[in-house]
Amino acid sequence: MTKQFLLDGQPVPFEDGQTILEAARIAGHYIPSLCWHKDFAPHGSCKLCIVKAAGRHVSACATPAKEGWEVESNSPEMNGERRGLLQMLFVEGNHFCPSCEKSGNCELQALGYEYEMLTSRFRHFYPDRPVDASHPDVLLDFNRCIFCELCVRASRDVDGKSVFALTGRGIDKHLVVNAESGRLADTDFAKDDLAANICPVGVILHKREGFAVPIGERTYDNATIRSKKLKESSS
Amino acid sequence: MSPAPARKLRVATTSLAGCFGCHMSFLDIDEHLFELVELIEFDRSPLTDIKEVGPCDIGIIEGGVCNAENVHVLREFRRNCKTLIALGACAVNGGLPAQRNHLPLSECLREVYQFRPGIANGQIPNDPELPLPLDKVRPIHEVVRIDYFLPGCPPSGPAIWKFLTDLIAGRTPRLTGGLLHYD
């Protein structure tokens, strides 16, 4: 008999070694995430996949499922935690959706809609993070970085180029480019790299195609991220 | 005996460091304006040209806080309005004016008033009547307590109408069905 746990009261089957998030997505349930990707080891930095398992708050992406667990995810308490996490992500960077090319395709923004975040509530940091427009095909706007390390992992593990890294600690943490000059143009980064196409927010942008799809017709303009991600994991 | 006619709610609006786009979007509720004027009357607002805010039920603030006068007006609104609403991206998170926040204020002023192409012998304006700019543009919730937030650049007419009808009817305003947008 297959093992199972309960997610918001629904039985979810799993195999040994699967995380709560993996098993939930396969079984057609949605647990939100920003830094998780099915092809990479869990990172556990965004904490959006926070669930209550056996009475404790854990990251669903990094916690192996256990037989008989009762996991709480889509509840007012957990969704309130998620809203708080989103608000902290918003004040930590410079997230001005009206002037962002990624608006409508941005997972951070879409999660803001999903969890009805109306205000960023806290005091804004307004950090100073200059952009890097040196590369002929790709623009880096560090203002929107949420430190998910998806580009770091993709560039290192798939593209084999190790173009990106995070450096600094705490409030000084930031994304850097692996070149002596620190400029993207001085790396072998290419627009077809996985790392160039994996950013969930608006940091890594392809030049000359920002508004090819107009605002209002983009991925999350008229559909929720919940419905889109469920469709993705069922296909 | 017929019930006493409901008192009209008194509403004040203003634009601080905003572009009046949210006020334009407010007017985009189109024919609903006729329904609205049956329910509310305006106090201080660009629509009435009343200069000082009086006691109100609802205050609607567009724009963030970029100078000393904005702070003064915002505090006056908070003092006079039972319910205060942040309308639009700039009021909610500083928006476009806050894009200057990573630059020193003196550099911004010099760039505009002294070094802009075509300007000769330019000086930074220092008339005492001009409100002093703040070193950083702030969203309004960092200055006074705000009761409700309605994001968007601008929030759409339908979003504003849904929000106001919820509020006037005594429901907690809620933007559902794609009405919530940050852009």
Image (cartoon, rainbow, N blue to C red):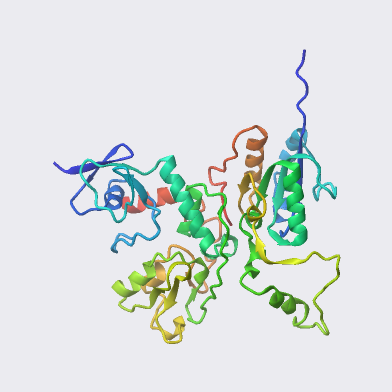
Q: Nearer the viewer, residue A167 or A214?
A: A167
Q: Is residue A76 left or right of residue B141?
A: left
Q: Nearer the viewer, residue A230 or A124?
A: A124
Residue shown at 30% from the left, 72% from the top:
A158
Q: Nearer the viewer, residue B9 or A190?
A: B9
Spot occupied by residue B94 in the image (x, y as percentages of width and height): 64, 60
Q: Nearer the viewer, residue A99 or B68?
A: B68
Can the viewer see residue B31? no
Task: Please give the count of numbered marks on the rendered protein.
Answer: 0
Spot occupied by residue A44 in the image (x, y as percentages of width and height): 34, 59
Q: Is residue B31 left or right of residue A131?
A: right
Residue shown at 86% from the left, 70% from the top:
B127
The quarter of the image holding the N terminus of chain B is: top right
State the residue lying farthest toward the left: A1
State the residue lying farthest toward the top: B1
Residue shown at 73% from the left, 57% from the top:
B71
Q: Name the image quarter holding residue A38.
A: bottom left
Up/down of B61 relative to B126, above or below = above
Spot occupied by residue B132 in the image (x, y as percentages of width and height): 77, 66
Q: Is residue A55 left or right of residue B115?
A: left
Q: Is residue A218 left or right of residue A58?
A: right
The quarter of the image holding the C terminus of chain B is: bottom right
Can the viewer see residue B86? yes
Spot occupied by residue B44 in the image (x, y as percentages of width and height): 81, 46
Up/down of A64 relative to B136, above or below = above
